[in-house]
Amino acid sequence: MSPASFLDNLDADSEWLAEVGSEGDPALSVPACPGLTLGQLVRHVGVIYNLVSTWVTEGHRPAHAPRPASGRSPAEWLGDGRTRLLAVLSARAPEEAASTWSPSEQTIGFWHRRMAHESAIHRVDAEAALSLAPRPVEPSLATDGTGEIVSLWLGTRLGTDVGGGGRIVTLDDGSGRWHVALHEHIVEYATDGVAADATVSADPDALYRWLWGRAPLEAVEVDGDVRLAVELRAALARATQ
């Protein structure tokens, strides 16, 4: 995906979230996040937008997460944050150096991508809280997001506490394929041609949602040992919490 496409998705999903925050019942529960309400979700997204804006502007992660100004509602906080974030990211070239939490990518483009996915997943959460028919995540964004969650989140957040048995799982959304093995202490990324012990297949939107815990196992097709798909999803739940 192009940096402009990431920003377009960020713009659209964040605008919708701001509107929902103003109009939706803040007490509604978010199904995929037990204990979280719609109002708390909106506040969380506002914190992330403002945190990343400060992070990029100051060149390092702030010591403390920003808080809404006195008198600002969560929806206003999110709206302020999205305006600021889009301005900060749009003003810099994607290849420009930037502080990030990725060991392999320190560019503004990292934040274009990360914030697009942050917004897409929480848009899905808000739709579920409101009992709205889910709108599919754009296929190219969903495919990119599968690559992101597998490489960035799974690859960086578990440390040496991976806890797998080393068997290979292939993820296939029709546009991309990823081959992952969870070992006891490391995550392995294999190349095409490897024999998988389980293959998890779905269209880009369904696979993306399942990997993020926003769709049940029944939303994907598993060929091979289903326990490996369950193990992978459990590892991702730990990695993304």
Image (tube, rainbow, N blue to C red):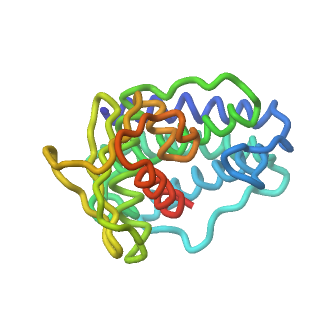
| Location of residue 51 in the rendering, given as x and y in whole percent from the top left corner | 57, 58
Q: Nearer the viewer, residue 193 or 148?
A: 193
What residue is rendered at 68% in x and 31% in y? 127
Q: Nearer the viewer, residue 32 or 192?
A: 192
Position of 143 relative to 43 (above/below): above
What residue is rendered at 45% in x and 38% in y? 208
Position of 111 relative to 126 (above/below): below
Q: Is residue 188 left or right of residue 86?
A: left
Q: Is residue 82 left or right of residue 110?
A: right
Quadrant location of residue 121?
top right
Circle count: 0
Q: Nearer the viewer, residue 52 or 36?
A: 36
The residue furthest left is: 193
What residue is rendered at 48% in x and 32% in y? 206
Give the quadrant of the N terminus: top left
Q: Is residue 29 left or right of residue 218?
A: right
The residue furthest front is: 225
| Location of residue 141 in the rendering, given as x and y in whole percent from the top left corner | 40, 33
| Location of residue 211 in the rendering, given as x and y in whole percent from the top left corner | 47, 46
| Location of residue 184 in the rendering, given as x and y in whole percent from the top left corner | 35, 74
Q: Is residue 61 left or right of residue 134?
A: left
Give the quadrant of the C terminus: bottom right
Quadrant location of residue 224?
top left
